[in-house]
Amino acid sequence: QVQLVESGGGLVQAGGSLRLSCVFSGRTFSSYSMGWFRQAPGKEREFVASISWSGGNPVYADSVKGRFTISRVNTVYLQMNSLRPEDTAVYYCAARYALGEVGTPPRRLDDYAYWGQGTQVTVSS
């Protein structure tokens, strides 16, 4: 069974940076596409970024493009720069079995079968 554990969240001032990590275990990491999602209080969970099982084709939400970077090397990371108060949310890591799939990794919540417990990111103004 796939298990995902996020870390790296915290409190940061606007304009600051954080790097989130998601440790994957239970199956072969290189067979899974990975995504980051977030959920702010009172709002629905939304897509942030995803990266394919092969490590290529990163995809970003328009709201974070140019500020956030997703990467993977045994662990999946989300480097968040130029943080804004509106980035405040619980950030979730997600995994999807995708070995052999081509094209960009998915953006929809329903496309991911495995989820972590989340890590809180709070950006103060």
Image (spheres, grey):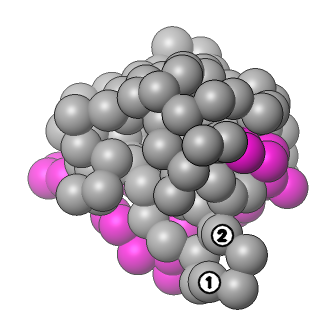
Asked if 103 appears above or below 30 in the picture, the reply is: below
Q: Is residue 98 magenta?
A: yes
User: Which mark identifies residue 40?
Assistant: 2
SS class of the residue under badge 2? loop
Q: Residue furthest left?
A: 103
Q: Which picture quadrant has residue 115?
A: bottom right
On screen, residue 104 versus residue 67, left or right, reads: left
Q: Position of residue 76 (x, y in %)?
A: 56, 28
Residue shown at 43% from the left, 55% from the top:
48
On screen, residue 10 versus residue 68, left or right, reads: right
Asked if 73 appears above or below 19 in the picture, the reply is: above
Residue shown at 54% from the left, 21% from the top:
17
Foreground of the two, 2 or 39: 39
Foreground of the two, 79 or 103: 79
* Residue 4 appears in view: no
Q: CA distance from mark 2 to mark 1?
A: 5 Å
Could you tell me the amino acid type at mark 2?
Ala
Residue shown at 82% from the left, 39% from the top:
5
Foreground of the two, 67 or 103: 67
Q: Position of residue 29 (x, y in %)?
A: 59, 32
**Do residues under tags 2 and 1 come within 8 Å of each other at their CB atoms?**
yes
Could you tell me the amino acid type at mark 1?
Lys
SS class of the residue under badge 1? loop
Our reading of the magenta stretch's main secondary structure is: loop
The magenta segment: 97-122
User: Which mark identifies residue 43?
Assistant: 1
Quarter of the figure with the C terminus: top right
* Residue 81 appears in view: yes
Q: How many marks?
A: 2
Query: Dot 2: within a 10 Å radius of its alpha carbon, few (fewer than 14), some, or many (20 or more) residues?
Result: some
